[in-house]
Image (spheres, rainbow, N blue to C red):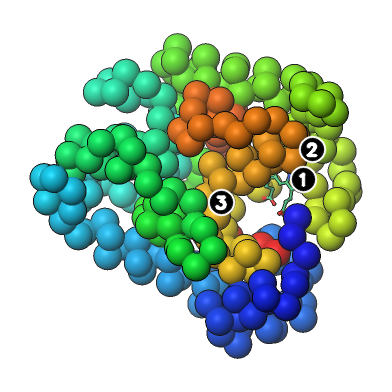
Amino acid sequence: MHALTPTRLSLALAAAGVAVIALLAAPQGLEAQGMEDDNPAVLWSMRGEELWATPVGPKQATLEDCDLGLGPGVLHGAYAQLPRYFEDSGKVEDLESRIVTCRMTLQGMSREQAEAGHFSATGEDSDMEAVVTYVVEQSQGIPMNAPSDHPAEQAAYAMGKEFFYFRSGPHDFGCVTCHSQDGLRIRLQALPNLAKPGGAAETYPSWPAYRVSQGTVRSMQHRLSDCLRQQRLPPVAYNSDLLIALTSYLAQESKGAPITAPGLKR
Ligand code: HEC
C-alpha cells in the first residue's frame, strides 16, 4: 500500500544493498521468485537461526527443543504442516503462535514477553519475523500439507472460510471484496484472487516475504492484520482465533503447493 517514497527506498537499499536496485528496475515477476541469493530475507533467516539457538528468558533455554508438530527440534517440513492442533496447548496453532507457546513453556516467558516486538517497527527489526523466516526456510520446496483431520482444525478452517466471505465494517467489506476477481489492482499492488480454486496456493506458500517497499520481512499474521486494517476493522490481537482461523483456511486451501518462502515482494 505504501508508495516507494525516497525514505523507504533508501531504507530498503540500506538493508538490501545494490541487489534491490536491479529488482526495482524489473519489478515484474517479483512475486514468482522464491528465496534467492539476492533476497535480503537471507539476513533475517541468519538472524533467526542465531536467535533459535540463543538461551534467553527466565529459564535461559533455547528454542531448539520446540515441537512444531513433527517432534521436538524437528524443523524440516514442519511449516508445511501448520497450522495444526496441538495436544499440549489444546489449540490450533500457526507457526507464530506456536513459537510463542515454546517461548512460554521452554524459556519461561510470560505471554507478554513472548509476543513482544512481533512485527518490525521503524528502526527495529522484529525477532519473531526473523525466527519465522528461519523456520519456514527449512520447508522450502516441500508441498503444503496442513492437517485437517482433527475437529479443531476443521473448525478453524470453517471459521476462516466464513470470515473470508463475511462483509462487515463501515464499508461493508469482506476479504472477498478485494480478493475474488482476477487482475484487480489497488494502485500498484496486484490483488490476488483468493476465492478461486488454487488462488490461495499461488500466494500463501510465499509468506513470510521481504517487502522492498517496507525494507523488512513480513509474516503471514502481519499480512492478514494489514488486510483487516484495510477492511477498516478494529485492530485484531496477535495470535487471535481470527488470525489463526484465516491462516488455517489459506493453508488448507494451499494443499500440495510447494513452499517458496521467504518470498520477495514490492
Ligand atoms: C480493501 C481491500 C482489501 C481487503 C478487504 C483485504 N485485502 Fe488482502 N490485500 C489487499 C492488498 C492491497 C494487498 C496487497 C498489499 C501489498 O502488496 O502490500 C493484499 C494482499 C493480501 C495477501 C497477500 C497476497 C500476496 O501478495 O502474496 C493475502 C494472503 C491477503 N491479502 C488476504 C486477505 C484476507 C484473508 C482478507 C480478509 C481478512 C483480506 N486480504 C482483505 C487488499 C485487501
Q: On residue 192, which mark appears? A: 1
Looking at the figure, which quarter contains the C terminus? Answer: bottom right
Q: Amino acid at mark 3?
A: Trp
Packing grade of label 2 (10 A; few <14, some 14-19, many >=20) is: many
Tell me which numbered mark, 3 or 2, is placed earlier along the sequence.
2
Dot 3 and dot 1 residues touching (CB under 8 Å): no
Identity of the residue drawn at 16% across and 56% down: 55
Mark 1 sits near ligand 1, with its Cβ under 8 Å away: yes
Dot 1 and dot 2 residues touching (CB under 8 Å): yes
In the displayed structure image, the side of residue 250 where residue 130 appears, left or right: left
Tell me which numbered mark, 1 or 2, is placed earlier along the sequence.
2
Packing grade of label 3 (10 A; few <14, some 14-19, many >=20) is: many
The single residue placed furthest to the bottom in the displayed view is 18
Is 236 above or below relative to 12?
A: above
C-alpha gap between disc 3 and disc 2? 17 Å
Mark 3 sits near ligand 1, with its Cβ under 8 Å away: yes
SS state under label 1: loop
Q: On residue 207, which mark appears? A: 3
Identity of the residue drawn at 67% across and 21% down: 163
Is 4 above or below relative to 31?
A: below
Q: Amino acid at mark 1?
A: Pro
Q: Quadrant of residue 256?
A: top right
- Residue under pointer 2: 179
